[in-house]
Image (cartoon, grey):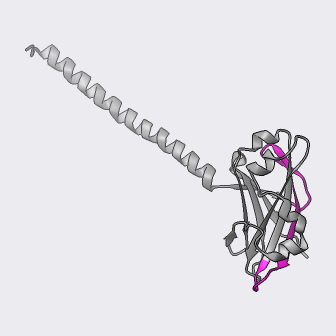
Amino acid sequence: MDSSPAKVTSTRRGYWLSMMALVVALPAALAAQTWGSIKDWHSQHVRQPISVSLGQPIDYAGASWTVTRFTRLAGSAGSAVVLAEFEALAADPEALGSVPCEVRLSDGSGREWRPTQFADPVVRKQYPEAEQRSLCGGMAFAATEPGKPARMAASFSIPPAASGLTLSIALYSGLPSYLSVSEPRT
């Protein structure tokens, strides 16, 4: 075994250089991984609203969107029902056919509701054409011919006292941005 001072010094130098490289490389790798995780979390949780008025077309996620109806109705069993109808004219509806869509309704106190399946008979009675519309997302676009708008609808069962309602429409390909429509003043 060679234990000359030059050999020992060279081995020690290599060891300490390796340790210093590890001290630099490990935090850099962790920082890169953490940054990617933060960006993923941000894109899923921190969203940026695009304010839209009822009837106003706006370009979003590869289509021209228009909220055509945002109506509050007296529901059955002491509840209220909100009916939202909207359409999107996409240059390539097939491309949006696989993109998930999320529609929500929220009020001024932070409560949120997801769409119901037109369960309330009030919607079926007053707006029967709404029942023929698709829910937001792939199915609506997949069934649409190029040059024609995909017509969609969502209804929400809410407490009658809910106020300051805001409709949110988000296509996953358009996140972190989403469409935000406030309830029209009557």
Q: Nearer the viewer, residue 82 or 106?
A: 82
Q: Residue at x 81, y 63 (%)?
A: 181
Is residue 76 left or right of 17 when viewed as pictured? right
Residue 65 located within the stretch drawn in magenta: yes
Is 145 left, or right, of 111 in this rendering? right
Eyeballing the image, is 21 above or below 59?
above
Q: Is residue 27 above or below residue 53?
A: above
How many tags in the picture?
0
Residue 44 placed where, x, y %?
61, 52
Place of residue 84 in the rendered image (x, y in percent of width and height, measured from the top left): 83, 65
Q: Where the C terminus falls, by quadrant?
A: bottom right
In the rendered structure, the answer to whether residue 7 lies left or right of residue 36 reads left
Residue 13's place in the image compared with 119, above or below, is above
Q: Residue, x 75% and y 52% (percent of image)?
A: 137
The answer to which image quadrant residue 25 occupies is top left
Q: State the residue at coordinates (90%, 52%).
A: 57
**At 73% from the left edge and 74% from the top edge, which residue is drawn?**
108
Q: Position of residue 5 (x, y in %)?
A: 12, 16
Q: Is residue 84 above or below residue 16?
A: below
Percent of width and height locating residue 50: 78, 55
Q: 133 and 149: which one is in front?
A: 133
Foreground residue among 12 and 67 = 67
- The furthest residue to the bottom: 78
Please state if 113 lies on the left or on the right of 64 as rendered: left
In magenta, the rendered stretch is 53-80
> Is residue 118 part of the magenta span, yes or no?
no
Image quadrant containing the N terminus: top left
Q: Quadrant of residue 169?
A: bottom right
